[in-house]
Amino acid sequence: MAEEKGYAVPGMPDHLFERGEVPMTKQEIRCLTLSRLRLKKGQTVLDVGAGSGGLSVECALLIPEGRVFAVERDPEAVKVIRANLEKFGVQNVTVLGGAASEVLEGTGLPPQFDRVIIGGSGGELQAIIKRSRELLVSSGVIVINCILLETLYESLQRLEEEGFSEISYIQAAISRSRRRGGKTALQPLNPVFVISATRNN
Amino acid sequence: MAEEKGYAVPGMPDHLFERGEVPMTKQEIRCLTLSRLRLKKGQTVLDVGAGSGGLSVECALLIPEGRVFAVERDPEAVKVIRANLEKFGVQNVTVLGGAASEVLEGTGLPPQFDRVIIGGSGGELQAIIKRSRELLVSSGVIVINCILLETLYESLQRLEEEGFSEISYIQAAISRSRRRGGKTALQPLNPVFVISATRNN
Amino acid sequence: MAEEKGYAVPGMPDHLFERGEVPMTKQEIRCLTLSRLRLKKGQTVLDVGAGSGGLSVECALLIPEGRVFAVERDPEAVKVIRANLEKFGVQNVTVLGGAASEVLEGTGLPPQFDRVIIGGSGGELQAIIKRSRELLVSSGVIVINCILLETLYESLQRLEEEGFSEISYIQAAISRSRRRGGKTALQPLNPVFVISATRNN
Amino acid sequence: MAEEKGYAVPGMPDHLFERGEVPMTKQEIRCLTLSRLRLKKGQTVLDVGAGSGGLSVECALLIPEGRVFAVERDPEAVKVIRANLEKFGVQNVTVLGGAASEVLEGTGLPPQFDRVIIGGSGGELQAIIKRSRELLVSSGVIVINCILLETLYESLQRLEEEGFSEISYIQAAISRSRRRGGKTALQPLNPVFVISATRNN
């Protein structure tokens, strides 16, 4: 069995994934995102701005009876997602190329989602959060990852305006050890904000 | 179904667990630990210094066909572990009360483990790492969590002396948002070092 | 000479200061603030929301020929500031009790300042930044400290609206060592944002 | 007056300094180092592994009646130090080229120092700490900066062996804002450990 097959957990090593030139959510952030997402068996997940597909793959592996819809507007990234789906032998992810604003209004989606991940918003954050709320079931969870302060702030504002509850976030400042002449220094990853909220009404 | 049942992922919220007066590995650190542990289906896991049992529970849920052995010397903590096993409906964890140095030499363990977690060492770190290497299969992974600088340093030294390879670590500095008068500040958790290494020979 | 006299540098230890029940800017944040402030000899400094007066004292010691005006609305804090001025033998600080919005419009201030520090805004951030720009000389520097995400965001917005340039900030995540049984853990201070900007027109 | 002249405080901006190819202690770390160093008027300072001379320059400016001895073994770095002394108009720094182990045993130094900074040890950490203790006055302060975990650990061990007291450290994880398309992300600097201790006997 290939190295990338058979892992039971999220937060798989970065090097297992195809990446191309597409930005990738790092191992540590993927697992923290999934921790906030609180997936349950058989759920339906929407991954907006799926990038290289790391989170879609891990969701799909965690809930093999569930379904994941990965939305991504960069055609190059769509190719990388497909390559990763094949690499990890994942069957339960549907990739939808195009801008989120269009795809989320289109006919290719199920009527409701249990979980929404926003990994990238391409300047459409407000519309995506609004539409996500409509698509989420009651008690559904949304998780938004961002590195920009302004996106963090705007997300919190929009989540509140849209009536989400349990709005909270973490800042993950992870440093990885790096060997330097037989000793080790800490190499910081870019700090990421992981925001989560629940639709309670 | 109770709130604590049915989650597919590690990094479950802290409040779901029984804690008593026993220190608990926080949600974010649990999921980062499991990310480093790289569990596979059906594996056998040793959790030394299991504390309140959070990591044992999550391992057991992630690999339901696998087995987890939780070693803990504090009788109070052993009770908390058992309460958590019951709360989460976990059947595949064996709790072994007693000092690690004794339990790991005793007859209650299987001859080999695929994964070892060290969450606490009670001053016996050197002996536990040495014994862990003996118990680990080839390509087996060990993950050590610590907050003390000295334990980090000593772990790296011992892992190297024992011939482990791929020795690395992360420092996880996680801050959680905290509401203050309608606004949010960052509340830092204690930084934790998560060390991992592989037995390659 | 008393321990608190004679130090040449900012970032003096916290325990040297009187504190009462008043929140205090920690040693590490004081020195980072002064680093961003870029004081020069003989300058005039406005310290809004002076709290226990730590930054006013350090500014006054750094530029003994300069003048510092400390604005603070909490009468209890005003007492603590005065106690610290006495303790450090500082003569060049004027304490102005009252809400910033009133004090900054009043007659007790010089017409211009070279530097402005905002350590607390009491809900009047927008007005204080606007008034600060009016009071600042050309090339004058403003430094704002905050722990709230919303204050950070709002400060950046207001500074931009008011035409400040060189707007930037740091996030200072400082952990101090703490002895635990002969070993050391890292105890994180609350992360602080230190914002700085220049009036260039 | 040139931009780099006339500042009253430590933690001057990085871009003011000549750097060449020599590693430089960043602005934020320089000011935190000086905060721990607790300089007083007229003191004598030893700066071992002075690098590009940033800390020597700032010490010299803070205590103009004092004296600073900068030890640096890299001839290229010695040139950079001299360039910085000239640039900042500093007269009270003596530069001593050569390995610390030799320079500290040689005849070019005063018999005692009030403060010692170790910014680099070139593999001679143990000898430098031992010799520093001999050279320090009673109540003298030593500050060691490092990015390597192993240097942190070894420093703490050696300081304790040499009988230093008040041994403590901070970890400074500073992130600077970086503009990205009109918004801001946090760019982490490498975390630095700043260790301090006092000779009390």
Image: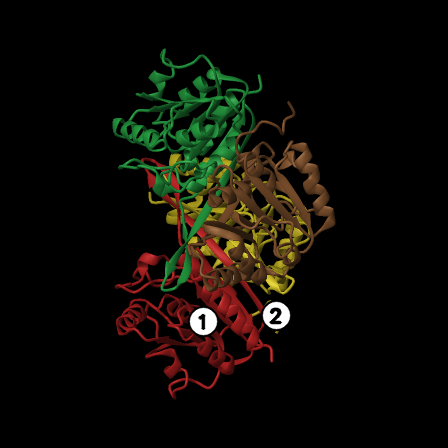
Chain colours: A brown, B green, C red, D yellow
Q: CA distance from mark 2 to mark 1?
A: 21 Å
Between D181 and C59, which is closer to the camera in this rendering?
D181
Res D98 quadrant in image: top right
Identify the element where label 2 is drawn: loop
Residue B32 position, x and y percent, is 49, 38
Q: Chain of mark 2?
A: D
Residue at image mark 1: C117
How far across and down, in percent of the image, does residue D176 sit? Answer: 56, 57
| Kind of residue sitting beneath label 1 | Ile
Q: Amino acid at mark 2?
A: Glu
Left or right? Give the position of D69 relative to D36.
right
- What residue sits right under mark 2 in the picture? D3
Front tag of 2 and 1: 1
For residue B163, side relative to residue B183 (left or right): right
Q: Decide if residue A155 is on the left or right side of residue B150.
A: right
- Residue at horizontal 45%, vertical 33%? B152
> Residue D67 versus residue A156: which sits nearer the camera?
A156
D54 up-or-down from A31: above or below: below
